[in-house]
Amino acid sequence: MFPLFQTSDSMLAVILAIVAFAFWSQKFKFFKMIGPALCVIIIGILLVNLRIVPGYTDVYGTISVYCIPFSISLYLLNVDLKQIMKMSKEPLLSIGSAVLCVSIVAVIFGVIFGNSMEEGWKIAGMFVGTYTGGSSNLTAIATGLNASPSTIAAANAADYVIGMPSLLLMFLAPTLLKKSSWFQKFWPYSFTEKELEGDGEEKELMAAGEWSIGEIAILLAISVSIVSIATKLSSFMSPDFASAVKILLISTISIAVAQIPAVRKLRGATNLGLFFGMMFLVVVGFTVDIRGFFGSAVSITLFCFCVILFSFLLHMMLTRLLKIKYEYVLLGIVGAIADGSTAALVASGAKWKSLIGIGLLMGVIGGVCGNYIGIAVAYIVRGIIGA
């Protein structure tokens, strides 16, 4: 009788239904607040612990093997290195500071918390990933380090519990800082209202987009080919490092291919990447025992809080010494903690029209760095604590 759904085809239907619901539900405030990623994980955990779906079936393994590599490749097929190189010094310094500070703090607290948590050294790398490029990097690094489903779910939950209030403060910050006379004296480096207004040619943020079945077919062919090449090359490595090398190769080859203008013009890559990533996160939820999940989530949440708080403080200190305009400082940390789209939303909400595109690019830079630095930090922490 139980589980209610057991066959591979019925489970694939359930997985796709959950993903569809998570996207559809974003029109409601509550679901938009927790985000689609945590939404599918929670639904997955509830269904498996209520014995509606099984803890394992063959389709889970297939999705786990293929979805995240495809997702990583598709996300990175939009990266324009020439556009990034044209950015002025201050935004580059700001996002560079944010990435550096997150990495330093993750190593420090990874060493402190590493042995008190299961897979603590992997969590350190995962948090570097999510706080340099967003949740997609967390999942990519978790896959590269062969983290357990319960660790991935707990890390995602901690990210939302601590990260969401942090982002709320970031959205409020432009208004609060503008009204603070103390802050204006302490941090006198900023844009004028005219500079922030821009020339009126900025594109509408989050505008509706179009893509064709031909573009989707080409994108899938490119991403599958990249994953196949990376998988073959990583097979020559030691089994302990093969998964990590595979993720890094996928990232590197995808960025290289993205420099071909015809590839970068293909529409729908980000949406496809998100779709595959969400399918994987549903499976993560299906493989989590709820009692073990809550047991590990508390310490991981404390670790997450320390990473966000102290990396933010270190970032503020460093950028103040460098005399960087506070608008860039704020967008840099938002681009790192969340992603480029969120940084652009902060700029849009603050009516910093001229900085919307820069916010997007800062997030892209963080995302590009995330997989490399996150995996490196994980192995540094592992070496120090002897895990």
Image (tube, grey):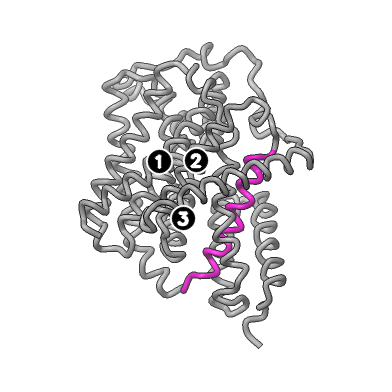
Q: Is residue 5 left or right of residue 104?
A: right
Residue 272 highlighted magenta (yes or no): yes
Indicate the quadrant where residue 319 lies. top left
Would you say residue 245 is visible in this rendering? yes
Q: Is residue 207 left or right of residue 276?
A: right
Would you say residue 30 is visible in this rendering? no
Where disc 3 sits, the SS reads helix
Residue 180 highlighted magenta (yes or no): no
Expressed as whole percent of the image width and height from the top left, the position of residue 223 reads 62, 44
Q: Which disc is residue 47 wearing?
A: none
**Predominant secondary structure in magenta?**
helix
The residue that appears at 53% across and 20% down in the rendered structure is: 82
Question: 311 and 128: which one is in front?
Answer: 128
Question: Would you name the residue on which mark 2 appears?
Answer: 251
Indicate the quadrant where residue 105 lies. top left
Tag 1 near tag 2, CB within 8 Å: yes
Residue kind at label 2, given as amino acid type: Ser
Residue kind at label 3, given as amino acid type: Thr
- For the residues marked 2 and 3, what is the alpha-carbon distance in whole angstroms? 13 Å
Where disc 1 sits, the SS reads helix
Indicate the quadrant where residue 225 lies. top right
Expressed as whole percent of the image width and height from the top left, the position of residue 147 reads 41, 60
Question: Would you name the residue on which mark 1 appears?
Answer: 372
For the C terminus, give its image quadrant.
bottom left
For the N terminus, give its image quadrant.
bottom right
Sequence-wise, which precedes: disc 2 or disc 3? 3
Q: Which residues are magenta?
A: 268-289
Residue kind at label 1, given as amino acid type: Tyr
Expressed as whole percent of the image width and height from the top left, the position of residue 248 reads 45, 43
Question: Would you name the residue on which mark 3 appears?
Answer: 143
The residue that appears at 58% across and 48% down in the rendered structure is: 71
